[in-house]
Image (spheres, coloured by chain):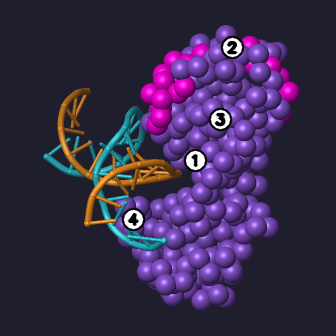
Chain colours: A purple, B cyan, C orange
DNA sequence: AAAGCGCCCTGAAGGC
DNA sequence: TGCCTTCAGGGCGCTT
């Protein structure tokens, strides 16, 4: 379930423990992630120095001198930094062991996560090159949403979940952002006004930023064995609240499947 | 080009 | 108690 805020919190959690350290050993226990883990991963990484951990969309970028490891948490993946001798548990698919006994352990029950190695500019990698702007950067605003959506009949909720339009808006925050902006999720993207898109872009920023701030305070230490809470205990206005009263007006929250995913909204606060 | 949907996978929840 | 079914979810990639 990691959405962008969880991925960013993970990045902030593990980076201080690993940056500027040397990879001593790599253990791959299960190559069958979304894509097979590269066979040469251990050979590639061992001896490499980690310069920095960055994030693009929901991908974590481990920048080494000779290339970049792209890691996606899928929907059930999480990372911890633990002593290398810690016995592996179920679904512990990958260890990257750094000097100073810092073992980065990747656990992913559903194996929707992935690991890629790329040399050169990682933004040119096939998985990254077509991605839209980062929602928290200055490169993102409502005007872009407006321009890109003209003549598109797709529901606005699906439109903002398209990573080519803007990255990092997952299913939960899509519903939450639309609630904040007062826009019904089922409306055609091409029928949303410029002013509404300005509100929506701002709502997306707000929702993600709040979640990141919350992550910083609620997530446990990434160096603890039980270091991941999975989900932030966010104050959700509509998501997973079908039939419950709107926190603003008391109207029953409605739910509908859109693009094979549950969507929630308040029929009174959103128009 | 845009839209729709299948699929990868496990675990939790619900029904019987 | 235990089995079976259903659902959840990110996002690529194929089809229409």
Can you tell which mark lies on residue A84? none
Q: Write down the residue under mark 3.
A: A118
Q: Which chain is disc 4 placed on? A: A
The residue lying at 56 percent from left, 29 percent from top is: A107
Q: What element carries label 2?
A: strand
The percent coordinates of residue A85 (x first, y second) are 67, 10
The answer to whether A8 appears left or right of A234 in the picture is right
- At x 72%, y 38%, the residue is A120
Q: Name the residue under label 2.
A: A25
Q: Is residue A17 magenta?
A: yes
Label 1 element class: loop
Nearer to us of marks 1 and 4 is 1
Q: Please say whether residue A218 is visible from this viewpoint.
A: no
Point out the tag, 1 or 3, that comes first from the N-terminus: 3
Q: In this view, does A102 lie above or below A108?
A: above
Q: Nearer the viewer, mark 2 or mark 3?
A: 3
Dominant SS in magenta: loop
Q: Give the quadrant of residue C7.
A: bottom left
Q: How crowded is mark 4: few (under 14 residues within 10 Å), some or many (20 or more)?
A: few
Which residue is disc 4 drawn over? A259
Whether labels 2 and 4 belong to a single chain: the reply is yes
- Nearest-to-viewer mark from 3 and 4: 3
- Judge whether residue A155 can be spotted in this image: yes
Q: Nearer the viewer, mark 2 or mark 1?
A: 1
Give the percent coordinates (x, y) of residue A50: 79, 28
Residues drawn in magenta = A16-38
Q: Earlier in the sequence, mark 2 or mark 1?
A: 2
Foreground pick, B1 / A240: B1
Q: How far apart are marks 2 and 4 (CA)?
A: 42 Å
Residue labelled with disc 1: A127
């Amino acid at each position: 379930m990691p959405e962008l805020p969880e991925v960013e919190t993970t990045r902030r959690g593990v980076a201080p423990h690993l940056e500027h350290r040397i990879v001593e050993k790599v253990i791959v226990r299960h190559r069958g992630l979304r894509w097979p883990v590269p066979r040469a991963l251990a050979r590639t990484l061992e001896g490499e120095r980690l310069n920095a951990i960055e994030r693009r969309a929901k991908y974590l970028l481990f920048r080494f001198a000779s290339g970049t490891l792209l890691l996606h948490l899928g929907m059930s993946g999480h990372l911890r930094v633990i002593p290398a001798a810690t016995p592996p548990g179920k679904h512990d698919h990958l260890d990257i062991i750094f000097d100073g006994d810092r073992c980065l352990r990747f656990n992913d029950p559903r194996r929707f996560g992935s690991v890629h190695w790329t040399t050169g500019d990682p933004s040119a990698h096939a998985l990254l090159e077509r991605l839209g702007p980062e929602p928290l950067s200055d490169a993102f605003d409502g005007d872009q949403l407006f321009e890109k959506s003209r003549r598109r009949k797709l529901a606005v909720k699906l439109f903002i979940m398209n990573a080519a339009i803007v990255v990092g808006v997952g299913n939960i925050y899509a519903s939450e952002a639309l609630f904040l902006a007062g826009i019904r999720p089922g409306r055609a993207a091409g029928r949303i006004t410029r002013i509404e898109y300005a509100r929506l872009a701002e709502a997306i920023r707000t929702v993600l930023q709040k979640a990141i701030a919350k992550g910083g305070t609620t997530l446990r230490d990434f160096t603890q064995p039980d270091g991941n809470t999975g989900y932030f205990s966010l104050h959700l206005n509509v998501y997973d609240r079908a039939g419950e009263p709107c926190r603003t007006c008391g109207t029953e929250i409605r739910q509908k499947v859109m693009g094979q995913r549950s969507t929630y909204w308040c029929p009174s606060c959103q128009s």
